Image: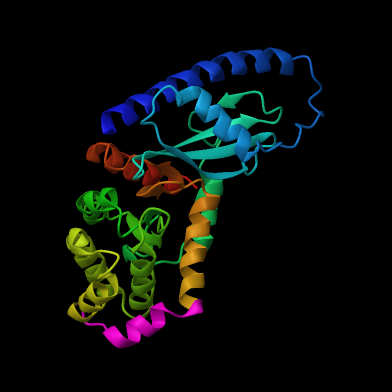
Amino acid sequence: MKTKSVALIAFFLLFCLSVWSQTAARHSRTAATKSHAEEAPAAKEPSAETLNSFMHHMFGYDPNAKWKIESEKPVEGIPGLTEVIIAFGDPVQQRTPFYVTSDTHHALIGQIIPFGADPFEPARTKLAANAKGPEKGNPNAPVEIVEFSDFECPHCKRAVPTIDKLITESPNARFVFEQFPLSQIHHWADRAADYADCIGRKNTDQFWKFEHEVFDQQEQITDDNAATKLSAIAQDVGADPSATATCADSPETKARVNQQYELGVSLGVNATPTLFINGRKIENVNGTPYEILKQMVAFEAQEAQKK
């Protein structure tokens, strides 16, 4: 099943890239004949029926193919495009975003990246103003590294040693942890995020101990025992387990965690872990060589000195 799903996803990517290249060329020729003052049409969102029919025609030949339309929304700041995220597999093995044009007759796939003389400035500014999670490292550092993470995510657990090493070896950087629980597939991630928020607001050192302990015990935590295990970990790191549980259940805590999640969504986060290095988004953290990450931090520190 996994091999078939991977093959399906690969085929889907190749197909949509082909459509993208043809569509992009056609649109570039057409755009040359239009006035710059003409506004792009508002995105017309395809119906769920249309999306499922599209996926059926793409993958219906395989009775084992499973997918779900996870979300559909206009692309912020890009008129005429609707982002659709498809979750492949049951349980979910991969999420793939693609984009539907305003005429609903074309689909594009690929990473939409910022462009301009300082392409990462908008994300950098938004994170500097709104990323308020627990932090470590030099508080006056010119480079801010923000991670959006999910305590139940195995890829986030795998990234912890790399990120710890990066912060230790980068005196010009400070690190901020933001919650991004993928509750549709990780059913105790919300609870862990609530506990972490409560602990972190009282004691940052306890938060980092809690983060490491939860990741260390990730395989032993289940939907059924999450409350018990998380309370035990809270006690182990020095927090009051009863007070933490009460705090975790409060609407105020859930609102704060949701604000962190929505911040990530506004920046195009759709998977964990996702890093931002002074606004530069790194989605494949575990697939990016450590030396490259370190060079990015050093480069951003140099760039900051020029300003």
Does the segment drawn in magenta span residue 244? yes
How is the model colour-coded? rainbow
Q: Is residue 222 above or below residue 7?
A: below
Q: Please give the name of the residue rendered at 21% of the width and 78% of the height, measured from the top-left corner.
A: 232
Residue 116, visible in the rendered structure: no
Residue 71, visible in the rendered structure: yes
Task: Answer with left or right where residue 52 lies relative to residue 274.
Answer: right
Q: What is the chief secondary structure element of the magenta stretch?
A: helix
* Residue 58: % across, % down: 49, 23
Q: Please give the name of the residue rendered at 38% of the width and 41% of the height, measured from the top-left corner.
A: 283
Can you tell which quarter of the image residue 168 is in? bottom left
Task: Answer with left or right where residue 203 lies relative to residue 41.
Answer: left
Name the foreground residue: 306 vs 213: 213
Does the segment drawn in magenta span residue 219? no
Name the foreground residue: 30 vs 277: 30
Q: How many marks?
A: 0
Can you tell which quarter of the image residue 212 is in? bottom left
Task: Answer with left or right where residue 46 lies relative to residue 55.
Answer: right
* Residue 115: % across, % down: 56, 34
Q: Which residues are magenta?
A: 237-251
* Residue 23: % across, % down: 61, 17
Name the foreground residue: 9 vs 62: 62
Q: Is residue 186 above or below residue 1?
A: below
Q: Please give the name of the residue rendered at 79% of the width and 19% of the height, measured from the top-left corner.
A: 34
* Residue 249: % across, % down: 42, 79
